[in-house]
Image: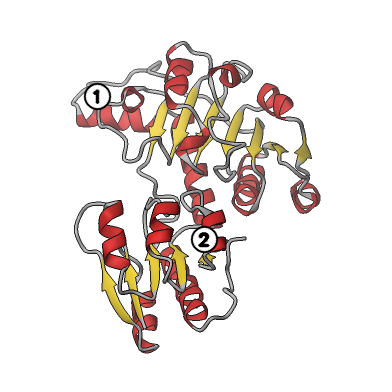
């Protein structure tokens, strides 16, 4: 059996595939593979491990309908046309659960970095602007005892809420399509409407999937419903917020700051005005980028690939 991998996965995954007599072909160029190249690469393969933002749309799936399984190197699956995959009987696997803690760490890091204008202050050192002690430089704000609003309180959102409640005694409110009774019991999280989430939160952290319902959910009108001293954090998908509206909300001081691990598009243009703002912290989509998490993701990928090649139900299948 043959597997094409469209990027880099942890060595433990490659080793396990080889131990199961799988022939591996891996994309090794330092650029994202194009749609045409991906189709060509998969023509004689039995499975695909999709790494990065490959668009697995109807055109790709119909051209590669022979694939026995597609394993995503992500928990998100918004890049896949699931309806077409189902019609063609191509099972899609993802990597849920194992990246929750690492991604929540990133959200927590961004919250603190924004609140203390850390990235901006670091740049001042690099640019030679730290000349002497200033008692009142660009001041930050404290998050201790404030209200954290979670938009999408699943596994990642719960990890973020736990950290904030434990470290900074933050009250937790959340908005989901359905209530998370586990979180309510464990950390006293309170379910609120979306409008209440906006009005009451000092920090809003986004942890929902990108769907037709959540695409462009955070627009200028939505930012205007948030507190003027609030912080917006997004470690989920860049398409959930409207980036032009976010820029305007920050420039006009409609909200206080923003921390992003995801942007739209990705990668972000180096001249994007967000990168120069003192109350913004941006990372290049590194939410799950730890050795431990990437190794765990690779092992799940192997399980999905092996099951798919045998015609068995995937242990981590996207429905």
Check if mark 2's residue and mark 1's residue have beta carbons within 8 Å: no
Identified at 31% across, 21% down, the residue is: 133
| Relative height, residue 16 to residue 64 (above, below) | below
- Residue at mark 2 to residue at mark 1: CA–CA distance: 55 Å
Q: Residues within 10 Å of mark 1 (few under 14, many from 20)?
A: few
Which residue is more in the foreground, 243 or 162? 243
The answer to which image quadrant residue 316 occupies is bottom right
* Identity of the residue drawn at 71% across and 24% down: 195
Q: Residue furthest top?
A: 252
Quarter of the image with the C terminus is bottom right
Q: How many marks?
A: 2
Circle 2 SS class = helix
- Of the two numbered discs 2 and 1 on the same chain, state the one appearing first in sequence: 2
Which of the two residues, 238 or 257, is positioned nearer the viewer here? Answer: 238
Q: Nearer the viewer, mark 2 or mark 1?
A: 2
The x, y position of residue 105, in whole percent, is 50, 50
Q: Name the spot of residue 7 as percent of width and height, x first.
A: 30, 62
234 over 115 or under it: above or below: below
Question: Is residue 81 rendered to the left or right of residue 278?
Answer: right
Image coordinates for residue 39, horizontal then vertical, percent: 31, 60
Q: Residues within 10 Å of mark 2 (few under 14, many from 20)?
A: many
**What's the mark number on residue 85?**
2
Q: Quadrant of residue 41?
A: bottom left
Task: Quarter of the image for the N terminus: give it.
Answer: bottom left
The spot of residue 23 in percent (x, y) is: 30, 82
310 horizontally vs 152: left or right: left
Q: Residue at x 57, y 23 (%)?
A: 230
Residue at (31% x, 40% y) in the render: 267
- Colour option used: secondary structure
> Quick one: 143 or 210, which is closer to the camera?
210
Q: Which residue is mark 1?
A: 130
């Amino acid at each position: 059996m043959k597997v094409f991998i469209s990027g880099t996965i942890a060595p433990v995954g490659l080793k396990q595939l080889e131990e199961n007599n799988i022939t591996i072909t891996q994309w090794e160029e330092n650029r994202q593979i194009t749609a045409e190249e991906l189709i060509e690469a998969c023509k004689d393969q039995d499975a695909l491990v999709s790494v990065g933002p490959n668009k697995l749309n109807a055109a790709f799936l119909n051209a590669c309908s022979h694939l026995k399984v597609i394993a995503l190197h992500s928990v998100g699956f918004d890049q896949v046309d699931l309806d077409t995959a189902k019609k063609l009987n191509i099972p899609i696997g993802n990597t849920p659960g194992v990246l929750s803690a690492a991604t929540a760490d990133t959200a927590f890091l961004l919250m603190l970095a924004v609140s203390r204008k850390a990235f901006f202050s670091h740049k001042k050192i690099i640019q030679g602007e730290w000349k002497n002690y200033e008692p009142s430089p660009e001041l930050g704000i404290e998050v201790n005892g404030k209200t954290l609003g979670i938009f999408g309180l699943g596994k990642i959102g719960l990890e973020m809420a736990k950290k904030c409640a434990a470290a900074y005694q933050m009250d937790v409110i959340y908005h989901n399509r359905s209530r998370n009774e586990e979180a309510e019991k464990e950390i006293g999280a309170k379910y609120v409407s979306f409008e209440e989430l906006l009005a009451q939160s000092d920090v809003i952290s986004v942890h929902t999937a990108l769907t037709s319902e959540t695409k462009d959910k955070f627009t200028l009108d939505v930012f205007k419903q948030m507190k003027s001293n609030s912080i917006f954090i997004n470690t989920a998908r860049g398409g959930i917020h409207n980036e032009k509206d976010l820029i305007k909300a920050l420039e006009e001081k409609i909200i206080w700051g923003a921390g992003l691990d995801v942007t739209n598009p990705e990668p972000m243009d180096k001249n994007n005005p967000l990168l120069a703002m003192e109350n913004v912290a941006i990372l290049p989509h590194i939410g799950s980028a730890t050795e431990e998490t990437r190794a765990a993701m690779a092992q799940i990928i192997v399980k999905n690939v092996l099951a798919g090649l045998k015609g068995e139900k995937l242990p981590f299948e996207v429905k």
